[in-house]
Image (cartoon, helix red, strand yellow):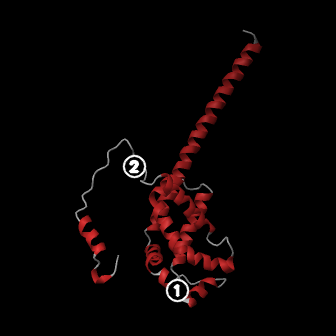
Amino acid sequence: MSPEVLGAWASLGTAIVIGASALAALVQLRHMRAGNELDALLSLKKDFRLPDLQSALRYIQVELPRRLEDPVYRRELETTGFVDSSAHPELIACNWFNEIGTLLKHRLVAEAPFMELFGRLIVHCWAHAASAVAIMRRTRGESQYADFEFLAIRAAKWIDRHPHGTFPRSLARETLPDRWRETDAKTKEHPIGGQAT
């Protein structure tokens, strides 16, 4: 065999080794990214369970609509600068959702598993918090909690695509016993204390 042929075979062998190394590196990077996304998702789930955030989420749902009726409360939200989160717990939740929106927008967290865990909650909280955000935007501009808004829009689209979740179609769903369904339906028809629920 001539030196030229041997050189060609050596070059081909080198190219194959380099190609295989590049492929292995891509696979390893993919696994590292998946591991990082899992770590981020687990960290967000851990944060979700923190008492301050749980209280803030409850506050948005239960107290915020009533509190927004107060002009002093609204003026505090409209003020530029520091707003005390002990007086405005909704900010704790808005900040958390805004941070997640930033992570999702920059694809540092995978959308599908996050939306599966939190999508409905995001849409629900945005519906309750949007009025407070609108008040803050009067003086702070449209960028105030823009990533929370982004997150809520993405969550609503995800729910539209998956109205019944992502339960595998190949598995049969269980029929869950709901022994209080009829009783609760009657309570809605004839509410206790005379107020509809």
Kindly give the residue lying farthest to the front in the view shown: 189
Does residue 192 appear left or right of residue 15 in this picture? left
Residue at the (60%, 54%) spot, across then down: 107
> Which residue is under mark 1?
69
Number of other residues with Cα within 10 Å of mark 2, as a class: few under 14, some 14 to 19, many 20 or more = few
Does residue 82 appear in this view?
no
Residue at the (43%, 53%) spot, across then down: 165
Residue 193 is situated, as x and y percent measured from the top left of the image, at 29, 84
Q: Is residue 4 above or below residue 22?
A: above
Q: Is residue 179 above or below residue 10?
A: below
Does residue 39 appear left or right of residue 77 in this picture? left
Quarter holding residue 146:
bottom right
Quarter holding residue 55:
bottom left
**Residue 167, disc:** 2
Residue 1 is situated, as x and y percent measured from the top left of the image, at 72, 9
Does residue 2 appear left or right of residue 62 in this picture? right
